[in-house]
Image (spheres, helix red, strand yellow):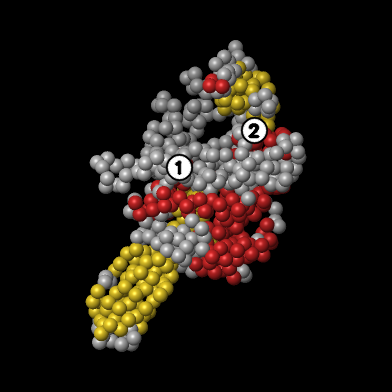
Amino acid sequence: MKMSCKSELNYISILLVIIVSVTPVWSQTCQYHTYLDLEEKLKQLTDDYSKVIDLNSHGETLGEKEIWSVTLASGEAASKPAVLIVAGINGTDLAGAEVLLHFIKTVAQSHGKIDSITNMLNQTTYYIFPMVNPDASDALFSKPQYARSLNKRPMDLDNDDKVDEDGYDDLNKDGLITWLRITEPGGEWFEDKEYPGLLKKADAGKGETGVYRLIREGFDNDGDGKINEDEPGGVDFNRNFTYKYKFFEPGSGFHQVSEVETRAVADFAYAHPNIAAIFSFSPNDNLNHPWEPAKGPAPKKPNEGRQRKPVEQVEKKDVPYYVHVSEKYKKITGLDDLPHSESGQGAFNEWAYYHFGRWSFSTPTWWPPLSSDKDTTANAADSTKKNFKKPGLESNKSVDQRLWDWLQATNQQDAFVEWKEIKHPDYPDKKVEIGGFKPFPAKNPPADSLLSIVQKYYPFLLQLSAFLPRIDVQNLKVEHLHDNVYRVTLNVVNQGYLPTNTRIGIRNKWCPKIKLALELADNQKLVSGRVLQFIEILDGSGGSKEVSWMVMGRRGDTLKINIGSPMTGTISKNIKLR
């Protein structure tokens, strides 16, 4: 689905604004912020730019950290179509919070100085959750440092009627939780011949035989023959939502939306029906690889047949919009070399589309780019230069191989801990080695490259505003039929790129329709038509619907019509009978 000429001009004007407006902020140094640092920054921004920033807490985690949201808007936030942006879904992703912190600051600084940014905030609201999983994110700032996706909910992950009794242990006292590789027949892993030190999973179909077992660094603390099977905490934000939720799976929680973190975001979304689109920094991508329609026979409609099955494929008529937004994302950011990600189980971005019914776009904040020469060196901030393959080139390299290449090319060789043999009390007769990628650089780029990442995402986050549905009234006509009888006809037109609803939103009957409300004076009477009418959906880029009424009134009288939905905003028209 192509963008209209007007939308294209809007997009170009936004990009011109960006060049002017962000230079003062981007010239500053970037750094990673702990939860407490981020909280302090958000409060300071709220004090500095209170006209456009509203900071709210949505509960406290079990780790005693508040879940903050920022409302970025001018005027009445709830009266305008909105974009919800969520970061920190995976506790290891710290870069997403930094992107959003810069986005909030840059837009707030530009309001009142740059006309296009000012107009954008007059017409659009941004709701932003910069760190929704703070207890998990805190693990990358703790000692020992380790990669974590679970919150601090006490859980019996190994079903032994005990909680949190077998977590990770820093065996070599280097302040990091890396990996143990244990030499044993029948192991799942073997050493990568092209990348000595890295391990590959053995594929029996290719005649490969494993020689290592790979587990996180630790002891068998509870003596059950397993290591690290019940770490402190236990619920993964991105496995706790209702779509494709898996009961009794590690990390899924006691039930759907059981946690304060997921409940905070879900409750916020349902309390704000003006949210038209959702963007999330998530492991489950659909911007680099847009969702595809189901292959094979078309699914039956809800009333066809006796059995109804959950919808598990994107609606066919929504697909062209996902494809086009994906193309725009790649063009704006220059990113499209992300490996395919698997569908989630209880994932937030899929819940946002399939159950909440909104346009949902997601991508990881960062991933190791494809390197064309692993021996080439460069600064991390320059990792998009010519020593890296341009987006679109296919590669069979694993994520670990790509990460290794990138670390070598950006002079981060110390981000990999060389394998070193140790004596492990749980494996006295086996060779055990500690090593592998360090947790932080394996999941996040160095701080000196954050500005380049901000520069990629900032224009796309602004462009989301231009994608939103915007309604207008065209071809308004008043016909005098007889004596004091008049016919009023008009077209409701969607001038935005995205339709006013997703097809899945119509199907699950949750998204609000466009409402047309006719207001009549005491001396006026409706002859034909309805005082209250609804339009289910208007396609993007000019989709329209003709509506008419026949009314009885005096010449010169005025009628009032209110048209809109929370997701499009509402416009009012005063129509004179003549």
Image coords of residue 118 (percent x, y): 56, 68
> What label does residue 347 carry, if any?
1
Question: Is disc 1 placed on a helix, strand or loop?
Answer: loop
The structure residue drawn at horizontal position 60% and vertical position 58%, both measured from the top left corner, is: 459
Q: Is disc 1 surrounded by few (<14), some (14 to 19) or many (20+) residues within 10 Å?
A: many
Image coords of residue 382 (percent x, y): 72, 47
Question: Is disc 2 placed on a helix, strand or loop?
Answer: helix
Q: Is disc 2 surrounded by few (<14), some (14 to 19) or many (20+) residues within 10 Å?
A: many
Judging depth in this view, the residue of 554 and 205 nearest the camera is 205
Q: Is 88 above or below relative to 523?
A: above
Image coords of residue 402 (percent x, y): 64, 36
Q: Is 571 above or below relative to 282?
A: below
User: Quarter-wise, where is residue 197 in the image?
Assistant: top right
Judging depth in this view, the residue of 374 and 451 nearest the camera is 374
Q: Residue furthest front?
A: 297
Image coords of residue 539 (percent x, y): 42, 60
The structure residue drawn at horizontal position 52% and vertical position 23%, both measured from the top left corner, is: 227
Q: Is 458 above or below relative to 9?
A: above
Q: Earlier in the sequence, mark 1 or mark 2?
A: 1
Q: Amino acid at mark 2?
A: Gln
Q: Amino acid at mark 1?
A: Ala
User: Quarter-wise, where is residue 18 in the image?
Assistant: bottom right
> What label does residue 479 carry, if any?
none
Which residue is labeled 2 in the image? 401
The structure residue drawn at horizontal position 70% and vertical position 56%, both measured from the top left corner, is: 28
Quadrant housing the C terminus: bottom left
- Nearer the viewer's eye, disc 1 or disc 2? 2
Image position of 563 (left or right of 329): left
Residue 102 showing in the rendered view: yes
The structure residue drawn at horizontal position 70% and vertical position 39%, both measured from the top left corner, is: 372
